[in-house]
Amino acid sequence: SEQQHCRKESSLTLRPQPTASSILGSWEVGKCDGLASLQNPQVQAWVDRRTHIDGELYASLQEGESMEIWALGKSMWGSRRFEWSNSLFTTHLLAAESGDALLRFELEVPPNEVVTFVLARSSCHLNVTGDGAAKGKSKKQRRQSRPGPVQDLEFLLRLRPSCP
């Protein structure tokens, strides 16, 4: 049947003991738009019955950077058209120091629901502005301290479903 076909293609296949899904991706320079924007990486999950999802988002952040996750319900599988009004939840993390950061969340998803997770961060690349405006540095020192090539930033999203 069509429903069984969709279940096989889903990244969150539901079984008596569902398995976790891990997605490795990146915020690409020029393709993400900071916090509270749909112009960011998105991951969709479809469930056929009420499901509890525990999730974790891992990323390296610089001191003062933020990352957030939005879960939007009533999505259409494969579509990037959503409304913020369908938000199931949002959670936010502000890094107190540079290094690896972990943002945990959990969510109860109604049956036959497609959820879209939007993964956002305050800065989508490393060292693009440099510290050229730093006080007390000469023009030559500022030029020498400019960063190398811009790098995309990776993330790891883990979703663990369980059926109540």
Image (cartoon, grey):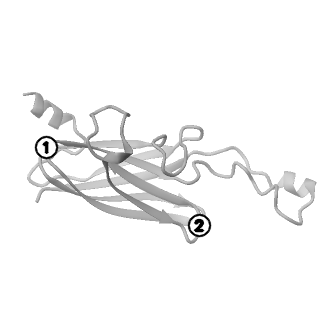
Position of residue 32 measured from the top left corner of the image (x, y, whole percent): 53, 42
The numbered mark at residue 112 is none
Q: Residue furthest bottom?
A: 96
**Circle 2 — which element?**
loop
In the depicted structure, whether residue 25 falls above or below residue 79: below
Q: Of 76 and 87, which appears nearest the observer?
A: 87
**Circle 1 — which element?**
loop
Position of residue 25 measured from the top left corner of the image (x, y, whole percent): 44, 45
- In the displayed structure, does residue 10 sit left or right of residue 59? left
Q: Residue furthest top?
A: 2
Q: CA distance from mark 1 to mark 2?
A: 40 Å
In the depicted structure, whether residue 15 falls above or below residue 64: above
- Which residue corresponds to the image point at 43% horizontal and 64% vertical from the top-left? 102
Q: Of 58 and 44, which appears nearest the observer?
A: 44
Label 2 neighbour load within 10 Å: few <14, some 14-19, many 20+: few
Q: Quadrant of residue 62?
A: bottom right
Lower position in the chain sequence, tag 1 or tag 2: 1
**At label 1, which amino acid type do we have?**
Asp
- In the displayed structure, does residue 123 sit left or right of residue 93? right
Label 1 neighbour load within 10 Å: few <14, some 14-19, many 20+: some
Position of residue 121 measured from the top left corner of the image (x, y, whole percent): 52, 53
Quadrant in which the C terminus is drawn: bottom left
- Which residue corresponds to the image point at 37% horizontal and 34% vertical from the top-left? 81
In the depicted structure, whether residue 84 falls above or below residue 2: below
Position of residue 83 measured from the top left corner of the image (x, y, whole percent): 36, 41
The numbered mark at residue 48 is 1
Number of numbered discs on residues: 2
Check if mark 1's residue and mark 2's residue have beta carbons within 8 Å: no
Quadrant in which the N terminus is drawn: top left
**At label 2, which amino acid type do we have?**
Ser
The numbered mark at residue 98 is 2
